[in-house]
Image (spheres, helix red, strand yellow):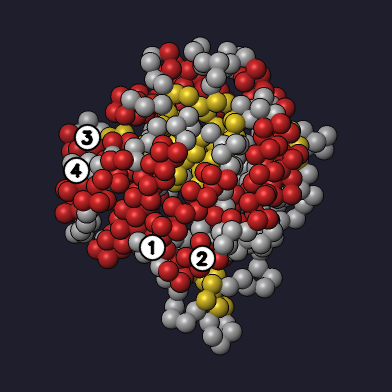
Amino acid sequence: MMFQKGFLWGGDISANQAEGGWNEGGKSPNMTDYQLGGTKDIPRMITYQMPDGSYGQTIAFIESVKLPKDAKLAIIPDKFYPNHKATDFYHHYREDIALFAEMGFKALNLTLSWARIYPNGVKGGINKEGVDYYHNVFQECKRYGIEPLVHLYKYDMPAFYVTEMNGWLNRGLIEEFYQFSKFAIDEYKNEVNYWSTFNEINVQQFAILNRNDKQEYQEAYTRLHHQLIASAKVVKYLHDNYHEKKIGCMVAGIFTYPYTCDPKDQLLNQKSMQEYVYYCADTFVRGYYPSYSKRLFKELGIEIKVSEEDARILLEGKVDFLEFSYYFTNLSTIHNEDTELTSGNLMGGVKNPYLQVSEWGWAKDPDGLKFYLHELYDRYQIPLINCENGLGAIDVLEDDETIHDDYRIDYLKSHVKAMSEAIDEGVDLIGYTTWGCIDLVSAGTGEIRKRYGFIYVDIDDEGNGTYNRYKKDSFYWYKKVIESHGEEL
Ligand code: BG6
């Protein structure tokens, strides 16, 4: 096993899925605060109110919601909004970080809530209470020698940016994000050494999957262009001002294989990987749009204007490391007849007959992790961090307060083994932060029963429960893994 001494073992949580405190400490609502819970089969709805007082619900990607004329985002009384209290990290962070430390975490991947720091945009000024909250969180990490790896953005800008400014479609958001990021980088300079600009930046592309709507494609790629420019500007700011610190960006690792040996499946898969994973990563790692982007724009019937200034910004803002999530793999095929389908994060697809699936239908594929670690490292030759990986499953809290999650241990064990093999074979993987290291609200379904954590939080899908924390069997397992530098699995 080749995990280096300084390997960043740890876990990952995000503000809107863990913190709660949605209207506390001066925070303004973000889009996830208007999302109801769903299930694997029932989508999450965004709620609004009409001028006559009636309420409505709509399905939409949270960054691009279009409400009926005169409607306003609204909270419907008596409905349960899972992200409002989430798993209450906002009030439990001391206890939770102490538990992470007990497992021996070297790193904690987390996101800043933009709406907690600049609730009303840059013009509205900073919210000191929100700023202090993150100082407290980072100080707590420091106490235990845990390195915070901080994402500046994870689908949770203040909601008014979306409803009043048209979100990332508005180029003005670049400056808002840049000012917010500059502020955070300066403010937390004594506490944070690793930054990341966007979480799963390629998510825009999944939101428009199979829409066949030119306008939607145009808008999604425009939003993405603005995010890529914003990211590059922030990367340059950090490089210019803090030479010793590192900054990355992250893609959702929605990796696919060709389903058959039909060359047409190979081509389809190549296109799918280019479009959904490499398009963003190629741009923020290499500093320019990939050559196939021209073909892609043509096929989608869209136009993305990259001015000379944009091109310069992209080139000056190349990241130091690449972060990616990895949960499962999918298949690409033109042979859709007689194939069984399965689900997945952001994108479902044809079922791989060689793989088992989770309770939510996601195909478990540790070999795929090894495969894609090689692919990513060969392509980019910069350090990698696997910042999200894990198994969403239903756990049972026994009468004696134990939780026997051997299925999660098996899943994680096989993935750690895959990573160690890839490292042995030359991949520069510098960190592993498992997703939802403490139970939190599922992004896709809003459920809490879809648990990923080493630590169980006692609440149900309606928010009933004590919010007490309990260690699962995987807690003790991961502690041993970290202690032994990945030797004892
Ligand atoms: C990742 C997201 O893509 O998938 C997380 O970044 C999310 O926010 C995770 O929670 C798992 O997905 P889900 O739908 O099970 O929460």
Task: In the rendered structure, find residue 123 and report the number of the disc placed on it.
Answer: 2
What residue lies at 22% left-to-right and 30% top-to-bottom? Answer: 261
Q: Secondary structure at mark 4?
A: helix
* Residue to which mark 4 is pinned: 292
- Report which quarter residue 105 is drawn in: top right
Q: Quick one: label 1, few (<14), some, or many (20+) residues within 10 Å?
A: few
Q: Earlier in the sequence, mark 4 or mark 1?
A: 1
- Report which quarter residue 252 is drawn in: top left
Q: Which amino acid does the dot numbered 2 rest on?
A: Lys
Q: Which amino acid does the dot numbered 3 rest on?
A: Gln
Q: Secondary structure at mark 2?
A: helix
- Left or right: 461 as drawn, with respect to 425: right
On the question of residue 211 being in view, the answer is: no
Q: Earlier in the sequence, mark 2 or mark 3?
A: 2
Q: Quick one: label 4, few (<14), some, or many (20+) residues within 10 Å?
A: few
Number of marks in the rendered image: 4
Q: Position of residue 385 (x, y in %)?
A: 46, 30
Q: Position of residue 199 (x, y in %)?
A: 46, 45
Q: Secondary structure at mark 1?
A: helix
Q: CA distance from mark 3 to mark 1?
A: 40 Å
Q: Secondary structure at mark 3?
A: helix
Q: Earlier in the sequence, mark 3 or mark 4?
A: 3
What residue lies at 51% left-to-right and 65% top-to-bottom? Answer: 123
Q: CA distance from mark 1 to mark 2?
A: 13 Å
Answer whether labels 4 and 2 touch (C-beta < 8 Å): no
What residue lies at 57% left-to-right and 52% top-to-bottom? Answer: 113
